[in-house]
Image (tube, grey):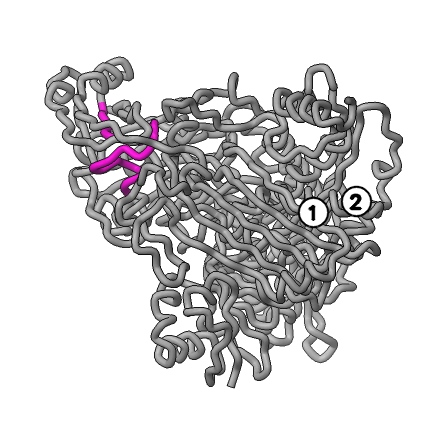
């Protein structure tokens, strides 16, 4: 089916979709009944603990665990030798889960123990003797690219460069995107702004640490309970790392206390399985907060150069950027997505973006909402605003004049279909916040953002119970309210009440494969599958009604939750409700269910515009966010409160990244702030109420027009806040986080150079 | 005959060539012919690519039809958080 044929008629009215019912998991979560990763337990359970490298870079000459193994209460010790050798895609995953011949960052797992108590496990870790040869380290992205930088991998030769370099380096790959001729574009410019920027690594900051309970029996059958965004991914990855058949491992996803992309890979899960297999007991591992910071994936840090040219009447003539992202000790930073999305908001004739994927002695980065895009947007949207300032044009009008629209050749190649960037800009301009007066030391910033979104493999079962209620089995962990949205879509299709549908996240042995909850895909793809499963069930329900009436199945239609004769010629029968058909299903052919298995394509891209007002204290450098507005295209908001929650959450995380959050490394290559006291995420008292406007430009690839909303909201905040702070402080800020010392330093330097405040 | 354009990084990996002509009615046929007629693309295709047809991005849809005169782009596999 062509994707644009999926969209239902636009005059369709909704009864359940677009309302704001209570979330099905709400009471469990506020009463403590909900079970998160650390809440599972099993008889005979052992405690698993991980020994981590104190060095940012060291060769591991040997590991002697004999003393630990001899300690009473210790049941197993594992090292990398206890995992299956990996030569393919999971090579780096294995090395990250458990180091081999080198420790590549402080906190890198080296060995693990399982013991009867936490105290014994911790004592055992101290008895493991690791003979390290300490090596020079590098943690800064620019330093890692220097010719004399310590090499992390002797065999890393930069890909994407012709001719291929003759020597290894810390640059894994060069990426390049764009079109046109930027030199010709800059030659047409009357104003050019060129700047360098830096962003520090931020953690996703999920409140729940990684936790799991693994149990492998003597027959080799394994079970795993864990908090994850993708339990099928966990199953397949762990089975590969452990050398197990996939069918022998059953994974159940717990409730999840935040993920934001950071729980899209494995860390302790395969370790717990290896320990359990060796010990013959269930093993639980719960990361400490320090471990979460030191050994799971934050974002990349970055170093970015941007150049934008424009005419004085506000037309951008060319945009150019160089992005350097370090992604920790392994190749795979999201610089490619940063490069693709860099100028995605604009309709430009001349664009060139080069990106470098760089390794450094830091933990392997993990996805974080729209991975790679916030950093490049920070730099590009800062320069876009500065150009607007220079030509004396309103920043929203400047963006409107250059905005991407239907028919624009995107910065990453394809031509856009129907998109909603212009509508978000117009809604921001029309919002009262844009007219609110500003006082002394206050500034306003605007920025736009883009993200791709995608669909992916999805499987849904919808079972009709005999009492007329519905059980919906989903395979995408609910990280943002998806169970409520799926219940709404099922209820909408079936014509029954929202409260009559209950959704669960099924384990990996109960439902077919589902891709990870990532890429803003779940409301789109699981929603599409839920709608199709409901329509499949309706076909079955109509067939049963036809049997009961003794008429052909195609003479029955489904309307408002009832089977009805299709017309006068079909016969004169009283409509049968879903409950009435379900009640006698055992006598009319057995259980009634609907299914859908799909690789959902057609997720629509998404755009947002953010508007923020701040006040900067010139004495302390502290920034207060006064007003914050998120305007974003949702395609169709299934549950508007959850959509608004995604918008607000992205803004709040962006405020943290922009003003406070950063990984701080000492000269010794060790993380200085692995805890929430020193790595401070925003709390409720730090932020104002985040205002939201939902724009709905339907996505033709979904029956209701849904576009993913989970990621785009993290893209504009760094730039929007930087633009606001720069206006408030009177000096252009080029590094996030814009912590008080950095703002004071910038103000002082501006004064010294005769700038504002001098 | 359709023209397949390579997005950004893929272009560099293909030795700078921006576009390839192939006879194909769907994504699978296009990828198979690209691989056989342009062996330099083989490692790139083996890594996995997304295909944009008339602006719509498909991550993994072998049998998606490609209408004549479509705009076809090969892009890196997308990821998300």
Badge 2 and badge 1 both on one subunit: yes
Q: Quadrant of residue A405?
A: bottom right
Describe the element under mark 1 as helix, strand or loop: strand
**Viewport quadrant of the N terminus of chain A:** bottom right
Q: Position of residue A343 (x, y in %)?
A: 64, 54
Magenta residues (range)? A94-114
Q: Quadrant of residue B54?
A: bottom right
Q: Identify residue for label 2.
A: A390
Q: Position of residue A632 (x, y in %)?
A: 71, 47
Q: Identify residue for label 1.
A: A193
Residue A30 visible here: yes
Closest to the observer, A198 or A670:
A198
Q: Chain of mark 1?
A: A
Q: Is residue B1 above or below residue A262?
A: below
Q: CA distance from mark 2 to mark 1?
A: 9 Å
Which residue is found at the position 17% from the left and 38% from the top? Answer: A81
Q: Chain of mark 2?
A: A
Is residue A279 rendered to the left or right of residue A591?
Answer: left
Earlier residue among tags 2 and 1: 1
Q: Position of residue A421 (x, y in %)?
A: 73, 54
Describe the element under mark 2 as helix, strand or loop: helix
Q: Is residue B15 above or below residue B81?
A: below
- Do callouts 2 and 1 mark residues in contact (Cβ within 8 Å)? yes
Residue A468 visible here: no
Closest to the observer, A121 or A612:
A612
| Residue A107 lies in the magenta stretch | yes
Which residue is found at the position 77% from the left and 33% from the top? Answer: A727
| Residue A495 lies in the magenta stretch | no
Q: How dense is the environment of label 2, judged by Cα within 10 Å: few (below 14), some, or many (20 and up)? A: few
Which residue is found at the position 80% from the left and 27% from the top? Answer: A442
Which residue is found at the position 45% from the left and 64% from the top? Answer: B12
Q: Is residue B71 above or below residue B23?
A: above
């Amino acid at each position: 089916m062509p994707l644009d044929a999926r969209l239902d008629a636009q005059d369709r009215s909704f009864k359940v979709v677009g309302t704001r019912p209570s979330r099905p998991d709400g009471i469990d979560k506020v009463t403590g009944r909900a079970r998160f990763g650390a809440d599972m337990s099993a008889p005979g359970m052992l405690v698993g603990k991980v020994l981590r490298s104190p060095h940012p870079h060291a060769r591991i000459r040997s590991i002697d665990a004999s003393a630990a193994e001899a300690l009473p209460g210790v049941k197993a010790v594992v090292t990398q030798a206890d995992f299956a050798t990996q030569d393919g895609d999971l090579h780096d995953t294995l090395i990250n889960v458990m180091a081999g011949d080198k420790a590549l960052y402080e906190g890198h797992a080296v060995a693990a123990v399982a013991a009867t108590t936490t105290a014994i496990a911790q004592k055992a870790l101290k008895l493991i003797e690791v003979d390290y040869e300490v090596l020079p380290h590098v943690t800064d992205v620019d330093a890692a690219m220097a010719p004399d930088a310590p090499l992390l991998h002797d065999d890393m030769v930069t890909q994407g460069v012709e001719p291929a370099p003759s020597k290894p380096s810390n640059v894994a790959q060069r990426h390049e995107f764009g079109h046109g001729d930027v030199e010709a574009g800059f030659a047409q410019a009357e104003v050019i702004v060129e700047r360098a920027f830096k962003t520090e690594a931020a953690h996703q900051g999920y409140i729940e640490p990684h936790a799991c309970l693994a149990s492998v029996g003597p027959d080799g059958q394994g079970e795993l309970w864990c908090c994850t965004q993708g339990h099928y991914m966990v199953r397949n990855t762990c089975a590969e790392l452990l050398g197990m058949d996939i069918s022998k491992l059953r994974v159940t996803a717990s409730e999840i206390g935040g993920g934001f992309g950071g729980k899209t890979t494995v860390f302790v899960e395969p370790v717990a399985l290896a320990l359990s297999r060796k010990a013959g007991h269930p093993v639980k591992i719960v990361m400490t907060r320090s471990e979460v910071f030191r050994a799971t994936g934050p974002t990349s840090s970055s170093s970015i150069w941007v150049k934008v040219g424009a005419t004085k009447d506000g037309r951008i003539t060319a945009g150019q950027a160089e992005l350097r992202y370090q992604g920790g000790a392994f190749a795979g930073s999201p610089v490619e997505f940063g490069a693709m999305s860099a100028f995605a908001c604009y309709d430009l004739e001349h664009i060139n973006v080069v990106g470098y994927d760089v390794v450094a002695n830091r933990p392997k980065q993990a996805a974080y909402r729209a991975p790679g895009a916030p950093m490049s947007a920070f730099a590009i949207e800062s320069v876009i605003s500065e150009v607007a300032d220079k030509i004396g044009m309103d920043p929203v009008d400047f963006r409107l004049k250059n905005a991407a629209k239907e028919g624009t050749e995107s910065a990453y190649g394809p031509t856009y279909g129907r998109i909603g960037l212009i509508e978000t800009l117009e809604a921001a301009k029309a919002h009262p916040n844009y007219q609110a007066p500003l006082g002394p030391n206050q500034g306003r910033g605007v920025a736009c953002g883009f993200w791709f979104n995608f669909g992916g493999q999805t499987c849904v079962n919808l079972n009709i119970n005999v009492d007329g209620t519905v059980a919906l089995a989903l395979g995408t962990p609910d990280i943002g309210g998806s169970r409520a949205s799926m219940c709404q879509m099922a209820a909408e299709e079936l014509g029954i009440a929202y409260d009559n549908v209950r959704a669960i996240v099924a384990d990996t042995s109960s439902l077919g494969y589902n891709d990870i909850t990532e890429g803003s895909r779940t409301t789109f793809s699981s929603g599409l599958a839920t709608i199709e499963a409901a329509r499949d069930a309706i076909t079955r329900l109509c067939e049963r009604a036809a049997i009961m009436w003794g008429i052909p199945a195609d003479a029955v239609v489904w309307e408002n939750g009832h089977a009805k004769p299709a017309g006068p010629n079909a016969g004169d029968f009283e409509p049968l409700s879903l409950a009435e058909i379900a009640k006698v299903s055992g006598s009319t052919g057995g259980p009634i269910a609907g299914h859908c298995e799909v690789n959902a394509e057609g997720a629509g891209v998404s755009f947002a515009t953010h508007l923020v007002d701040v006040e900067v204290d010139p004495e302390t450098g502290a920034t207060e966010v006064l007003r914050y507005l998120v305007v974003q295209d949702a395609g169709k908001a299934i549950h508007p409160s959850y959509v608004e929650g995604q918008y607000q959450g992205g803004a709040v995380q962006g405020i943290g990244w922009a003003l406070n959050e950063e990984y701080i490394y000492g000269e010794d290559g060790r993380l200085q702030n692995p805890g929430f006291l020193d790595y401070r995420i925003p709390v409720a008292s730090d932020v104002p109420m985040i205002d939201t406007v939902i724009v709905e430009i339907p996505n033709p690839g979904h029956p209701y027009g849904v576009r993913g909303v989970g990621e785009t909201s993290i893209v504009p905040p760094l730039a929007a806040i930087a633009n606001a702070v720069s206006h408030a402080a009177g000096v252009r800020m080029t590094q996030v986080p814009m912590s008080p010392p950095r703002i004071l330093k910038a103000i002082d330097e501006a004064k010294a150079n005769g700038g504002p405040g001098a | 005959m359709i023209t397949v354009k390579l997005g950004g990084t893929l272009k560099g990996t293909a030795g700078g060539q921006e576009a390839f002509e192939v006879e194909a009615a769907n994504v699978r046929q296009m990828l198979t012919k690209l691989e056989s007629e342009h062996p330099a693309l083989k490692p790139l295709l083996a890594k996995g690519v997304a295909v944009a047809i008339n602006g719509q991005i498909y991550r993994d849809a072998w049998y998606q039809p490609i209408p004549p005169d479509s705009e076809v782009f090969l892009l890196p596999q997308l990821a998300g958080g």
